[in-house]
Each structure stands twice: as C-alpha cells, then as structure tokens.
Amino acid sequence: MSLQRVGFTTFAVGLFVGTVLLVLGPGGSGTLVSCPGPRLLSGFAIEGAQAWPPRVYYTDGCDGRALDPSFAVAFLVALLGLLVAAAGQVADSVGGE
C-alpha cells in the first residue's frame, strides 16, 4: 500500500469519526439558559481554545459551551493523514523522475 493511500485513508477515517463525534456524540458541556427571542447568526462566536486537552469554547449569543476534546483529536488525525498523503505525493514525484 502506498504512502498516499495510507494518508488518504487516515484522513478519511479521521474526518468521518470527527464529524460523527461532533454531530452525534457528546457535544460537550455548557450552560442551558433560556434565551428570549430568536438568536442571530452574528451572536455565535469563539471565545477561546485550549491546547491540551484540545477544547474549543464558544457562545451562541446566550449560552456558553465547550466542545468535547475527542472530536478535535479525530480532526488532528485527519490532518496527520493529509500530511502523510502529501509526503507520499512528494516521494512519488521525486522517485518517478
């Protein structure tokens, strides 16, 4: 199996698992305050990020939330897969000349 295929497979699995965890998994913790009226898209904002454990803090204009770190690890695996695939592409282009 080539380095490109390993990288692309790692990317695809990381992206799939990260998306499933983000949508269906435990989204994280947060406050549940009853917000009167509709919330505007402009009310959503990232409040901060934490390097380890990877966590993202955001607000929807009323409630503060923190996303679970497991989804971030899955997306880091996807990024690693992209780097491996790019290294495989470079290795193939250098070796093919």
Image: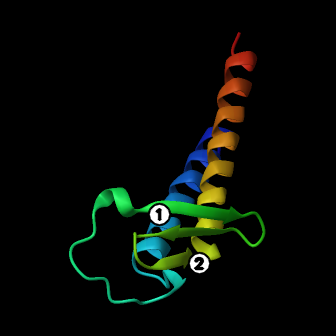
Please, what secondary structure does the residue beneath circle 1 have? helix
In this view, 75 is above or below 71: above
Residue 72: quarter of image: bottom right
Name of the residue lying farthest toward the left: 37
Few, some or many C-alpha atoms within 10 Å of disc 1 (few <14, some 14-19, many ≥20)? Answer: some
Q: Amino acid at mark 1?
A: Phe
Q: Residue at x 57, y 52 (%)?
A: 11
* Residue under the point 40% across and 70% down: 60
Label 2: which secondary element: loop
Of residues 28 and 72, the one nearer the viewer is 28
**In the image, what residue type sits under mark 2?**
Asp
- Residue 2 visible somewhere in the drawing: no
- Say which residue label 2 marks: 68
In this picture, residue 3 sits left or right of residue 78: right
- Which is nearer the eye, 55 or 10? 55
The residue shown at (74%, 17%) is 94
Residue 44 coordinates in the image, percent (x, y): 41, 62
- Report, in whole angstroms, how far the alpha carbon at label 1 lies from the one at label 2: 16 Å
- Residue 39 in percent (x, y) is at 27, 69
Which sits in the foreground, 68 or 94? 68
> Which numbered disc covers residue 26?
none
- Which x, y percent locates residue 54? 70, 68
